[in-house]
């Protein structure tokens, strides 16, 4: 299964990049995310719960960022599993500044699906994935807007007396040699969201149904339903 697309984010590229690398933001823009943990540099573990028929279940997985080119591009390598199946995926995220100062976000990816998930059907899975991505992008924009820095008010400039000269500081002790400092611990942060904080995949069913209705089988079924309804109405007259 392959998916790609483009979205416009109403924010500068630097803010979008910062949000895409902030675990607090990511946990709140992934639909169904219950927990997201940073287990190392550019490495994450997460738990996602989806309550939709066909893909219903709790999924856990790991994500690794590669080929990071800040603030423009990175590749994601993900592996997840749940009671309904397994998913292995590779994706890319690319940012570009627009003339108006906003940002274009280009995404693409390919996933291999196994287990019961594979029996749901590629078109339905694609419809669900596109809806989840669309919802995540809207949530990302909302999170960026919430975190946008507010410009402080600049006080009026008034004539002030000259400040007295600062006393001469005494000789400070030499800083410790960095080579002898203990090695820092690996980066590890965890975000656990309450149910009220989790982004609900509310539009997932509509997306799956919409994709199905746009398929050839879906259109045929609609025609058959229309014929049956017309026949029944005709008999009722």
Image (tube, rainbow, N blue to C red):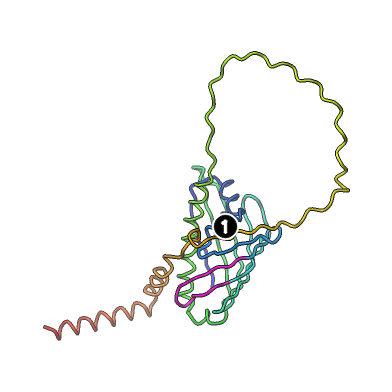
**Magenta span contains residue 55:** yes
The mark tally for this picture is 1
Q: Position of residue 10 (x, y in %)?
A: 48, 47
Q: Is residue 151 above or below residue 57?
A: above
Which residue is painted at 88% across and 36% down in the image? 174
76 with respect to 229 (left or right) = right
Question: As rendered, which of 120 and 172 lies closer to the eye?
Answer: 172
Q: Position of residue 228 (x, y in %)?
A: 24, 84
Which residue is painted at 59% across and 14% down in the image? 159
10 with respect to 65 (left or right) = left
Q: Give the image quarter of residue 66.
A: bottom right
Q: Quadrant of the C terminus?
A: bottom left
Segment tinted magenta in the rendering: 46-59
For label 1, the crowd category at 10 Å Cα-Cα, with few meaning under 14, some 14 to 19 and many 20 or more, is some
Which residue is painted at 51% across and 65% down in the image? 32
**Magenta span contains residue 204:** no
Q: Give the image quarter of residue 21.
A: bottom right
Residue corresponding to mark 1: 26
Q: Give the image quarter of residue 149.
A: top right
Q: Position of residue 55 (x, y in %)?
A: 49, 75
Q: Secondary structure at mark 1?
A: helix
Q: Position of residue 158 (x, y in %)?
A: 56, 16
Question: As rendered, which of 131 and 166 lies closer to the eye?
Answer: 166
Q: Quadrant of the N terminus?
A: bottom right
Which residue is painted at 53% across and 46% down in the image? 147
**Residue furthest to the left:** 237
């Amino acid at each position: 299964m392959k998916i790609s697309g483009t979205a416009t984010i109403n924010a500068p590229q630097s803010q979008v990049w910062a949000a895409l690398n902030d675990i607090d933001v990511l946990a709140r823009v992934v639909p169904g995310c219950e927990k997201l943990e940073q287990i190392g540099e550019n490495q994450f573990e997460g738990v996602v719960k989806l309550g939709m028929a066909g893909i219903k279940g709790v999924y856990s997985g790991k994500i690794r960022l590669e080929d990071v080119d800040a603030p423009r591009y990175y590749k994601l390598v993900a592996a997840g599993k749940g009671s309904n199946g397994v998913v292995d995926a590779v994706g890319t995220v690319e940012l570009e500044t627009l003339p108006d100062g906003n940002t274009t976000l280009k995404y693409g990816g390919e996933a291999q699906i196994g287990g019961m998930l594979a029996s749901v059907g590629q078109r339905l899975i694609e419809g669900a994935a596109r809806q989840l991505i669309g919802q995540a992008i809207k949530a990302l924009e909302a999170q960026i807007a919430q975190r946008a820095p507010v410009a402080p008010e600049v006080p009026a400039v008034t004539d002030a007396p000259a400040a007295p000269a600062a006393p001469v500081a005494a000789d400070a002790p030499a800083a410790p040699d960095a080579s002898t400092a203990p090695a820092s611990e690996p980066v590890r942060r965890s975000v656990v969201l309450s149910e009220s904080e989790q982004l609900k995949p509310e539009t997932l069913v509509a997306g799956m149904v919409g994709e199905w209705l746009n398929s050839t089988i879906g259109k045929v079924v609609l025609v058959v339903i229309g014929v049956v309804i017309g026949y029944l109405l005709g008999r009722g007259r």
